[in-house]
């Protein structure tokens, strides 16, 4: 009787956790694509060139990469609920200040504040959810939050195109204010306080090397597309590698001496975690790189308006919305590995089909490719579930540490994908510009066709990396759920008998 009375409360609470944290994740992810839509208006408002305005995007990305490793410390020191509400409030405050910015420097500074909250927010979401769900139910849980992860970047251009076009660039940030207030109130009322360890010592040296290395590395890669000094970019790249290597040595040394590291890198010793995270890096690289290129293809080459391009891209979100619940249920029954492998096959196929895009490709064909891509994104959303499959929900430190490691690498891979695939387009389009001009093409057709051929090579690279991700995912050990299930059922029956 006691067991039956407790069970509904536990199930109800874990889904309230999912609802509360999903809203925060959706708001943070949608913000990135809405801001991209507002870049041209910011140029006109501040009288700045594109290279200067790009810092609005770059500073946010760099700040996120720098502060993500702090998430486990905050979660352990202050408790998951308090840390989540604080970071959500910082993001809300930064959004409000960005909308009130009076010039470009003030906007860049306020984006720095917003990035502090946004960077810590994402690993906190994963930590809270994985603490609420047992391992055998995380596939379904990841599908729900995966809706935010996959739909928000695709939904952002549609909403952003309308708001920015109708009310101005400020609404790229003001839209977060009502959503943020609702998210903070929900988190405050619905989340339970978790145990805190106030005496935990902060790993300052680890933070400096991790933050400095991540930010420097991402800056070097981002500067490739901005036409920065090649020698300076190489120097920053090498510096970033050195700092991250120093970070790894510092963290491993702390573990050997029994001290609390900023991130416990021993988790990579788990094959399921290590290979899953490596596959996730490739997937994030591909997904965000393609997500950056498709709007450029639709608007600049296919001559669609920003709003029309956003509606076309919504096909990807619709497909994701439809497939995610199915993928979650299959992952809970079969394990995440086969679901992810199926998703990687679809991802390879969709990237390869993008190589066939032309300047006059029919809209229905573009939508078909995006539907396939959205389905693939829904299935590969189970990669973090595979990575965390051997961590129990009551292992709070391991959950927080693993969640942060996943988020750090995902946040690092995403802008790298954007920078490198965009660089391929830029470099190869210049090559085709010369060769096509010798064939008699000129004017706007020459520019568009050379850019399209450069995009084809980027899409081909994405397809090749999806194949590599498939091979890496094959190295993930098979799910041991079938061996653990009888033991879990027996333990549950025993607990129910003792409660009665």
Image (spheres, rainbow, N blue to C red):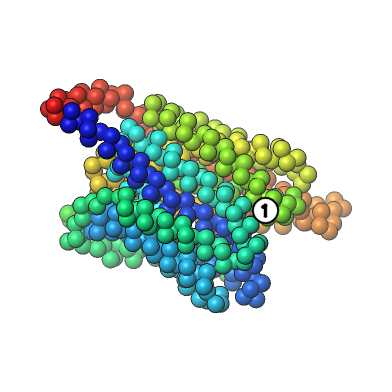
Q: Quadrant of residue 200?
A: bottom left
For residue 126, side relative to residue 49 (left or right): left
Q: How crowded is mark 1: few (under 14 residues within 10 Å), some or many (20 or more)?
A: some
For residue 435, side relative to residue 30 (left or right): right
Q: Position of residue 362 (x, y in %)?
A: 75, 40
Q: Where is residue 193 in the image (x, y as percent from the top left)?
A: 24, 52
Q: Position of residue 177 (x, y in %)?
A: 47, 62
For residue 359, side relative to residue 247 (left or right): right
Q: Residue at x 56, y 56 (%)?
A: 33
Q: Which residue is drawn at 29% across and 58% down?
A: 82
Q: Where is residue 122 in the image (x, y as percent from the top left)?
A: 40, 53
Reply above or below: 483 against 203: above
Q: Residue at x 44, y 38 (%)?
A: 143
Quarter of the image for the N terminus: give it: top left
Reply above or below: 171 against 352: below
Reply above or below: 140 against 424: above
For residue 133, side relative to residue 52 (left or right): left
Q: Which residue is drawn at 38% across and 49% down?
A: 20
**Residue at label 1?**
307
Q: Is mark 1 on a helix, strand or loop?
A: helix
Q: Can residue 218 be seen in this view?
A: no
In depth, the one of 66 and 396 nearer the eye is: 396
């Amino acid at each position: 009787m006691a067991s039956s009375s407790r069970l509904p409360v536990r199930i109800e609470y874990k889904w309230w956790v999912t609802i509360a944290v999903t809203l925060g994740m959706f708001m943070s992810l949608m913000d990135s694509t809405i801001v991209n839509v507002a870049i041209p208006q910011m140029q006109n408002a501040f009288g700045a060139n594109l290279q200067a305005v790009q810092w609005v995007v770059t500073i946010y990305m760099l700040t996120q990469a720098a502060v993500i490793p702090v998430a486990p410390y905050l979660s352990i020191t202050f408790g998951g609920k308090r840390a989540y509400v604080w970071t959500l409030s910082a993001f809300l405050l930064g959004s409000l200040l960005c909308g009130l910015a009076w010039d470009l420097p003030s906007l860049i500074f306020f984006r720095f504040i917003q990035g502090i909250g946004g960077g810590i927010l994402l690993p906190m979401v994963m930590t809270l959810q994985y603490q609420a769900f047992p391992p055998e139910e995380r596939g379904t849980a990841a599908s729900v939050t995966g809706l935010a992860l996959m739909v928000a970047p695709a939904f952002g251009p549609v909403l952003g195109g309308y708001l920015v076009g109708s009310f101005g660039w400020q609404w790229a940030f003001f839209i977060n204010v009502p959503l943020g207030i609702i998210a903070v109130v929900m988190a405050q009322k619905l989340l339970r306080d978790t145990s805190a360890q106030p005496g935990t010592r902060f790993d300052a040296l680890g933070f400096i090397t991790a933050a400095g290395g991540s930010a420097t590395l991402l800056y070097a890669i981002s500067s490739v597309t901005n036409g920065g000094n090649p020698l300076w970019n190489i120097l920053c790249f090498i510096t970033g590698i050195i700092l991250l290597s120093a970070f790894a040595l510092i963290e491993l040394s702390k573990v050997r001496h029994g001290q609390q590291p900023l991130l416990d890198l021993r988790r990579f010793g788990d094959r399921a975690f290590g290979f899953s995270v490596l596959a996730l890096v490739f997937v994030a690289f591909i997904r965000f790189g393609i997500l950056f290129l498709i709007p450029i293809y639709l608007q600049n080459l296919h001559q669609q308006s920003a709003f029309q391009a956003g509606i076309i891209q919504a096909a990807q979100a619709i497909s994701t919305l439809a497939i995610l619940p199915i993928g979650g249920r299959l992952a809970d029954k079969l394990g995440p590995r086969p679901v992810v492998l199926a998703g990687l096959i679809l991802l390879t196929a969709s990237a390869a089909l993008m190589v066939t895009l032309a300047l006059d490709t029919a809209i229905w064909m573009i939508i078909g490719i995006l539907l396939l891509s959205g389905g693939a994104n829904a299935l590969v959303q189970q990669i973090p579930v595979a990575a965390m499959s051997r961590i129990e929900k009551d292992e709070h430190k391991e959950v927080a540490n693993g969640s942060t490691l996943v988020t750090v690498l995902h946040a690092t891979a995403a802008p790298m994908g954007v920078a490198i695939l965009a660089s391929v387009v830029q470099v190869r389009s210049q090559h085709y510009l010369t060769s096509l001009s010798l064939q008699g093409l000129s004017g706007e057709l020459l520019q568009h066709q050379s850019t399209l051929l450069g995009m084809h090579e980027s899409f081909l690279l994405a397809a090749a990396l999806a194949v590599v991700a498939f091979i890496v995912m094959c190295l993930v050990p098979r799910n041991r759920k079938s061996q653990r299930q009888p033991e879990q059922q027996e333990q549950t029956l025993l607990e129910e008998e003792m409660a009665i």
